[in-house]
Image (tube, rainbow, N blue to C red):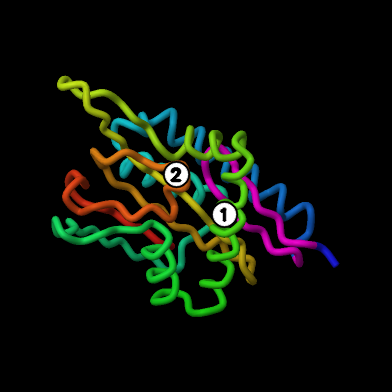
Amino acid sequence: MIKDDICLVAGNLLLVAGEFSQRLREDLLDSVLFSQLYAGAKVVKWSDAESWYTECATAMERVKWQRTVYKNSSFEPKDDAGFSIRDSVVNQVHSLFGKNLVEKFEQLINCIEHSFVEEAAGRVLREHAVATEKTSDDADFSTIALQMGVLGPGPVLYSGFVCFKTSEEVEVDFLNQCFSGTHIVGEVSIDFA
């Protein structure tokens, strides 16, 4: 039996189910890498993460990965509210695609959580998903731009992108971190296709 593969391709977390051929797997990885390079040539990711993601999606469509369903939601968390990337991803996937894909996205997140134990894997993910800079008053300010996807039957690539800025310290396991609405700067943007 062929196992599912979990990959980190230029910052994009991917789960490729075991039933897909090696050729299709390589095609997906090449397409994702191309889309990241294409977007990076058009927009600096950390300057405008939303536009960068739009360019990634455009590049994926150009190399045959069409988006049949698309949903974008943006919201500004209340000061007393918490925000978790994991919970938001699971809720969005459930409402758009149903329980079967929730299980696959949870499998992806769980695998990544275990990789945080291995410091190298956690550092690579953080390098691609979190950018922290110092403000003029010497405080940390972070942008989180996390892209993830699951290759499902069809084949169809179900993808998600979560982006927001925070003045809160970003933990190693930021996928499960409960970010305080008080520290989130502006809106949280969540895109699924």
Q: Is residue 3 left or right of residue 184?
A: right
**Magenta residues, as a range?**
3-19
Picture disc at residue 64? 1
Percent across and percent down for residue 189 are: 28, 54
Q: Is residue 27 left or right of residue 165?
A: right
Q: Which residue is mark 2?
A: 56
Percent across and percent down for residue 75 are: 20, 59
Q: Quadrant of the N terminus?
A: bottom right
Q: How far is disc 1 from disc 2 in space, using C-alphas?
A: 13 Å
Q: Is residue 105 magenta?
A: no
Secondary-structure class at tag 2: helix
Query: Residue at left 47%, top 47%?
Result: 173
In this view, the residue farthest toward the right is 1
Whether residue 43 is visible, yes or no, is: no
> Which callout, 1 or 2, points to the residue nearer the camera?
2
**Precedes in sequence: disc 1 or disc 2:** 2
